[in-house]
């Protein structure tokens, strides 16, 4: 006897668990995970629709009390059921409710109606219509006569025109449709966010190295579900043509009747990526991102479901595109932290992609010039198949210079720009070449502080300093709190109050002051808040409407501007000393990616890295683009400290408005964890509880506990048992608890 665990009413929080049913013998060969079924539910045994999450030999409770599945819904083994199965997997592996997982996996609500175009046509010959007019004349059916006369003169008429201009009621139209006089046709008008321009055809011509990588991957693509994911890591230096390989693989996928998803880390990358893909694949391409309306997203998912498109491009959410025949998932710049969700469920796109790959038979291709330590570690272990691209498709690797800012200060240079960077900017302006200046902080200044008493102005709702913007406003980048810059120190009343540190706005002003003839663009969260702003700024820079682009990390990721021959990194230390075990890795990646923007055309490129820590191993390795050198240093540190990928780790994140309640809940769950460790997990290491780097956001207090040292499965089991405790204890009534696996 076989049993099925079935999820039913996905909109109801109380039904956030599967129900066990017996699989009738005659249906055993037709039911598997993802199958849509009709089941008797409740005391009245009303028939409702459900989706099978799991087929098992073990019943979930007393067999004598279990009901049988009534029937299989024909044609229900479709993409929705597969996505619901995926949502269940996410719920189980990352710690969330089924509702939270479903909202993630199926982000477009069914309430969003598709845009419909209705037209009315004659359902008879013109001669028959003239006879009908005579009949209706005798009955004084003037409205029907008007419509028939109009249809004799026109092949079809918009329904809106019929009701608005001809003044014919909906009831008349319905009556004539029932009588067979007319036919009302409905066409769905799907919005297309991608404009396919008449660009020249973009043929893929791979070099020998690219061709070898593509062919090696193709050999493994059988498009059949399997127990283990088919994952490939392409480690290609910046400008080595990873995108060309992706497009060749997508072409192969489409020719085999399958679809492809291309994930990119930032909306900012959409512009150039889509341009390249639409030149090659035309109308087969669409996009989805967070800036689109619910209606636009709905339309793209419907087009994907109907097979009108074959390629979906977008950030993390594009992973859930409802393709029925998924064959390939490409994750570009796979090292990016944007692929990890910051909200519950805190899933990682790479892990979820692998699950989709197992279920659908899709191959997973990861690409980066600076792979995440986790991916490179798995490639070295043979878990991922490893491929390397070592030569630039166009141009040469830039010359990288490290400038010690301590020496600049000794030489009395207090400017934002080192002498070397200033000279190189001037040189590029003279040569009509472009420059990119990168700093990982928006705004005008890092924080505002009093030079007499040392007090920094903090957000009243968050445990962070306020950032100064050029409009004399102090802004909290966590909760959005805004206040005017005070004239006097709130603490001591001193007039010696001002901004410390630098941001993108300050750099923009400094550039304009030092190089008054230069045309400058700025790209950060402030300038890209409006829809389409990313594309406008990037297209303007691509068209050489500006000489210098100032920006945060969004400008250094994956963009290809052939005329950029200089990249300046103004404060390399900013990410180096973040309170995160990945700080060195993030710094190395940012510097390498930034350096990779220079010299991608015919002219040689220069990169200037300004730092107070020129001897740090991540900065030194980045200066000569040596990933292996960095990896060996960093993996030794990870092994020493038992950090991922060498060890598994999860954080237990607690937050609540009442600090006393939060402390009680934190102490309680810590004791539970210690008890579980003593009983079952003797290798478990417990770090904390402690305050996180930002211990309060929007008046909500935070605490964190780190757990590591045991297997991923053991951590999931521990997470499950903690969730049971949290759901049953009054200590957590007003406390939100989140689990976050460190991939």
Image (cartoon, helix red, strand yellow):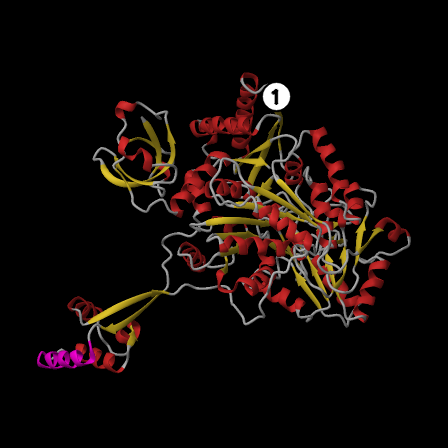
- Residue matched to label 1: 683
Q: Nearer the viewer, residue 252 or 243?
A: 252
Magenta stretch: helix, strand or loop mostly: helix
Report the label total. Answer: 1
| Residue at the right extreme, as displayed | 411
Q: Which residues are magenta?
A: 125-139
The picture places residue 363, in percent across and down from the top left corner, at 53, 45
Mark 1 packing: few (<14 Cα in 10 Å), some, or many (20+)? few
Image point (63%, 47%), residue name: 336
| Residue at the left extreme, as displayed | 138
Q: Is residue 646 left or right of residue 351?
A: right
* Depicted 740 relative to depicted 216: above or below: above
Q: Quadrant of the image for the N terminus?
A: top left
Q: Is residue 681 left or right of residue 14?
A: right
Q: Secondary structure at mark 1?
A: loop
Q: Is residue 303 left or right of residue 535?
A: left
- Locate residue 144: give its quadrant: bottom left
Q: Is residue 684 visible?
A: yes
Q: Quadrant of the image for the C terminus?
A: top right
Q: Nearer the viewer, residue 362 or 723?
A: 362
The picture places residue 113, in percent across and down from the top left corner, at 36, 59
| Residue at the top extreme, as displayed | 679
Image point (46%, 26%), residue name: 725
Q: Is residue 24 visible?
A: no
Q: Is residue 99 magenta?
A: no
Image point (48%, 56%), residue name: 310
The picture places residue 179, in percent across and down from the top left corner, at 15, 68
The picture places residue 347, in percent across and down from the top left corner, at 53, 41
């Amino acid at each position: 006897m076989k049993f099925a665990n079935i999820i039913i009413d996905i909109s109801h929080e109380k039904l956030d668990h599967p129900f066990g049913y017996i699989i009738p013998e005659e249906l055993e060969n037709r039911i598997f995970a993802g199958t849509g079924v009709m089941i008797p539910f409740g005391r009245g045994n009303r028939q409702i629709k459900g989706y099978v999450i799991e087929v098992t030999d073990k019943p979930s409770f007393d067999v004598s009390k279990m009901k049988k599945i009534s029937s299989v819904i024909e044609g229900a083994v479709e993409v929705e059921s597969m996505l619901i199965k995926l949502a269940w997997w996410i719920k189980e592996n990352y710690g969330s409710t089924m509702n939270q997982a479903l909202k993630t996996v199926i982000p477009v609500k069914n309430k969003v109606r598709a845009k419909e175009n209705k037209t009315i046509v004659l359902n008879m010959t013109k001669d028959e219509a003239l006879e009908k007019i005579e009949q209706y004349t005798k009955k004084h059916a003037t409205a029907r006569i008007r419509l028939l006369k109009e249809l004799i003169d026109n092949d079809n008429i918009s329904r809106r025109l019929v009701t608005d201009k001809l003044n014919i009621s909906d009831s008349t139209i319905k009556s004539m449709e029932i009588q067979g006089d007319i036919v009302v046709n409905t066409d769905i008008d799907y919005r297309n966010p991608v404009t396919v321009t008449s660009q020249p055809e973009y043929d893929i011509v791979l070099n020998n190295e690219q061709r070898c990588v593509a062919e090696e991957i193709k050999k493994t693509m059988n498009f059949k579900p399997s127990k283990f994911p088919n994952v490939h890591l392409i480690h290609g230096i910046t400008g080595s043509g990873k995108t060309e390989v992706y497009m060749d693989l997508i072409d192969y996928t489409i020719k085999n009747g399958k679809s492809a998803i291309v994930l990119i880390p930032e909306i900012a990358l959409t512009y150039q990526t889509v341009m390249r893909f639409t030149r090659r694949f035309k109308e087969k391409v669409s996009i989805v991102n967070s800036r689109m309306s619910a209606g636009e997203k709905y339309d793209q998912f419907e087009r994907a479901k109907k097979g009108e498109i074959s390629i979906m491009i977008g950030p993390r959410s594009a992973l859930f595109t409802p393709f029925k025949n998924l064959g390939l998932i490409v994750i570009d710049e796979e090292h990016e932290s944007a692929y990890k969700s910051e909200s519950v469920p805190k899933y990682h796109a790479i892990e979820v992609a692998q699950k989709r790959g197992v279920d659908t038979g899709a191959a997973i291709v990861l690409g980066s010039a600076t792979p995440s330590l986790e991916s490179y570690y798995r490639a070295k272990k043979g878990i991922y198949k490893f491929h390397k691209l070592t030569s630039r498709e166009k141009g040469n690797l830039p010359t990288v210079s490290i400038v010690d800012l301590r020496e600049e200060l000794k030489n009395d240079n207090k400017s934002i720009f080192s002498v070397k960077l200033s000279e190189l900017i001037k040189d590029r302006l003279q040569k009509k070449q472009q420059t990119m200046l990168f700093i990982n902080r928006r705004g005008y200044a890092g924080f505002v502080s009093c030079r007499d008493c040392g007090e920094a102005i903090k957000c009243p709702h968050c445990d962070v300093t306020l950032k100064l913007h050029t409009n004399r406003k102090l802004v909290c980048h966590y909760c959005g709190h805004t206040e005017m810059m005070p004239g006097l120190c709130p603490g001591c009343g001193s007039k010696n109050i001002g901004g410390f540190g630098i941001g993108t706005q300050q750099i923009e002003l400094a550039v304009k002051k030092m190089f008054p003839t230069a045309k400058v663009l700025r790209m950060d969260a402030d300038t890209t808040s409006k829809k389409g702003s990313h594309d406008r700024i990037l297209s303007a820079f691509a068209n050489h409407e500006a000489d210098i682009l100032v920006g945060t990390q969004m400008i250094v990721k994956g963009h290809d501007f052939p005329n950029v021959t200089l990249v300046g990194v103004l404060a390399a230390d900013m990410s180096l000393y973040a309170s995160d075990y990945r700080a060195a890795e993030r710094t190395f990646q940012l510097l390498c990616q930034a350096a990779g923007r220079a010299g991608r055309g015919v002219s040689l490129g220069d990169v200037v890295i300004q730092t107070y820590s020129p001897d740090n191993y991540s900065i030194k390795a980045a200066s000569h683009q040596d990933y292996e050198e960095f990896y060996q240093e960093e993996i030794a540190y990870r092994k020493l400290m038992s950090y991922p990928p060498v060890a598994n780790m999860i954080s237990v994140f607690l937050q609540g408005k009442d600090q006393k309640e939060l402390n009680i809940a934190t102490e309680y769950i810590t004791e539970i964890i210690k008890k579980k460790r003593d009983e079952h997990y003797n290798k478990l290491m417990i770090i904390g509880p402690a305050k996180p780097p930002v211990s309060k956001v929007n008046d909500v207090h935070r605490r964190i506990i780190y757990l590591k040292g045991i297997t991923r499965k053991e951590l999931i089991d521990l997470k499950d048992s903690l969730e049971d405790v949290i759901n049953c204890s009054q200590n957590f009534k007003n406390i939100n608890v989140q689990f976050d696996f460190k991939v």
